Amino acid sequence: QVQLVESGGGLVQAGGSLRLSCAASGRSFSSDAMAWFRRAPGKERVFVARINKSGNTSTYIGSVKDRFTISRDNAKNTVYLQMNSLKFEDTAVYYCAADVGGDYNYDYWGQGTQVTVSS
């Protein structure tokens, strides 16, 4: 059974940092692009960051660029999202996802981890 399991969420004050992890099991994702999305209260799920299979190329939504960093450890089948200088508006459930086909259609999703930033 293929699973993506996020962890590392929690409550943090504005200006603080959190590091999210997404551990994959059931298959290797070392050949697949991976991404983070988030869903804020009352809003739709949106893209946050994406990393290619080798980890040398990443893209971000503008509102998190220079604050968030996506990375991966293919040996551990794990993707990370380092979040610095957190803002109240970063409050959301964060999901990781795997793009198996490389076509920006995400085939596997985690269950999400809650990040709450207090102002």
Image (tube, rainbow, N blue to C red):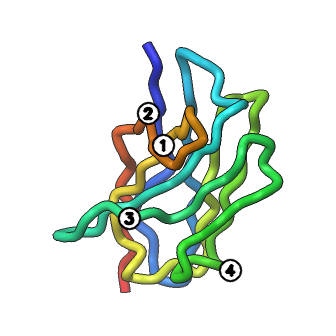
Mark 1–mark 2 CB contact (< 8 Å)? yes
The earlier-in-sequence mark between 4 and 1 is: 4
**In the image, which is nearer the foreground, mark 3 or mark 4?**
3
Q: Secondary structure at mark 2?
A: strand
In the image: residue 74, left or right of residue 89 = right
The earlier-in-sequence mark between 3 and 4 is: 3
- The quadrant where residue 42 appears: bottom left
The residue pinned by badge 4 equals 66
The earlier-in-sequence mark between 4 and 2 is: 4
In the image: residue 115, left or right of residue 30 = left
Residue 32 placement (x, y as % from top left): 65, 36
Quadrant of the drawing holding the C terminus? bottom left
Real-space Cα separation, disc 1 to disc 2, in angstroms: 5 Å
The relative height of residue 117 versus residue 36 in the rendered view (above or below) is below
Mark 3–mark 4 CB contact (< 8 Å)? no
Residue 31 placement (x, y as % from top left): 71, 31
Residue 47 placement (x, y as % from top left): 45, 63
Residue 51 placement (x, y as % from top left): 67, 52
The residue pinned by badge 1 equals 97
**In the image, which is nearer the foreground, mark 4 or mark 1?**
1
The earlier-in-sequence mark between 2 and 3 is: 3
**In the image, which is nearer the foreground, mark 4 or mark 2?**
2
Residue placed at 64% from the left, 61% from the top?
82
Residue extending furthest bottom? Answer: 119
Quadrant of the drawing holding the N terminus? top left
The residue pinned by badge 3 equals 46
Give residue 108's mark: 2
Real-space Cα separation, disc 4 to disc 2, in angstroms: 27 Å
